[in-house]
Amino acid sequence: MKKIIRITTVPGSLGILLKGQLRFMNHHYEIIGISSEGSVLNNVSNDEGIRTIPVNMTREITPFKDLKALFELYKIFKKEKPSIVHTHTPKAGTLGMIAAKLAGVPHRLHTIAGLPLLEAQGNKRKLLNIVEKLTYSCATLVLPNSFAMQDVVIKEKFCKRDKLSVIGNGSSNGIDTAHYDRKMVSNEDIDNLKQKLNIKPTDTVFLFIGRIVKDKGINELVKAFDTISKNNSNIKLVIVGPSEKELDPIEQDTESIIKRNQNIHEIGMVKDIRPYVAISNILTFPSYREGFPNVVLQASCMEMPCIVTDINGCNEIITHNYNGLIIPPKDSDALKNAMLDLLNNPQKAKELALNARSNIIKKYKREFIWEELLNLYKTLE
């Protein structure tokens, strides 16, 4: 059986972003997962039924550690002799593609699920541009996970059009539509969580799910909500996700508002987001940049209208005034107006919600994405 090696920088990406996909592919190829060491990588091995190999990689620019990881990957590729190396996430992509080319791996695929460099400036941006071009030059095929992301790559001249391909309608892994279903959350769980967060039946709950960082638009969201809540006592903002203060911290003022405003609940990281979606009314996702946001797929699949920014991925999943609202990025006033629009027009919010799930089932079911990727692998044989 031919081998395919799939690589991410951190094991959480391997286990969460590609959940189920690795097990599916393992029926057709011998799949080996590579990511940084730890218990999470062991969990991926058990959950997906695949062999995993630890190689420590960092998300920051760390030349000596990067060279060490590059050499380790090269040795693994020479020993395992995979027919395909398929990387995800920026650092794993760069190291994996260079090592695979040096090791003579015939098919080298890199999926782009976001471009952090788009928010960088000055010398850092120049360096990241060079690294991105190097990654794509070492790949034989580059897979943007949205059509708009593909357009960005072409516009930035990172690589030629004929090296790019989008799987299906976009997304790295599609979505498990049976799992992300409101019916999967019991009324008892909903009632208990509402009671715990002091959410009354008359409250409208805005929800954010994602990393608590500047790039996700948290500063704009908290500011907009704080302004609205001064005249509306029956609203709540639930923020779900880990804080990353060392990489992309939110403003001190934003931290202060979160602590001060009694209607804002910061939950932290959770294993299962579904109960939080089930108690909420509207997803607010004012991100600056995305590849193809799973959160918007998941919330839409659970019949939730979404307020998103006009960036790639978001503006492909959401159609303005059909299954959500689209606003400009980095615009707290536009976000506030969109939130007020759905708060003051509950019937409109319901109509947007009605279109949300059917759109996801039609375009982004995970089995469809898996089959499309499998077909691509087979054409490379």
Image (spheres, grey):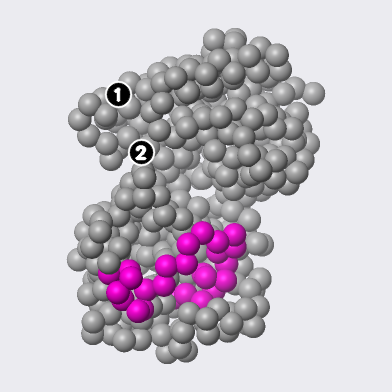
First of labels 1, 2 by sequence position? 2
Q: Quadrant of residue 39?
A: top right
Q: Is residue 16 left or right of residue 112?
A: right
Q: Measuring from the top left, give residue 211's x and y in whole percent.
A: 42, 53
Instruction: Determine whether, in the image, residue 370 is placed left or right of residue 133.
Output: right
Q: In the rendered image, which residue does mark 2 sit on?
A: 116
Secondary structure of the residue carrying numbered label 2: helix
Above or below residue 119? Residue 229 is below
Please give the name of the residue rendered at 65% of the width and 27% of the height, measured from the top-left corner. Answer: 5
Q: Give the residue at x 59% y 59%.
A: 271
Q: Residue at x 33, y 46 (%)?
A: 248
The amino acid beneath tag 2 is Pro
266 within the magenta span: yes
Name which quarter of the figure residue 338 lies in.
bottom left
Q: Answer whether residue 117 is visible to the viewer in this image.
A: yes
Is 265 located above or below residue 300 in the figure?
below
Residue 193, percent across and down? Answer: 55, 78
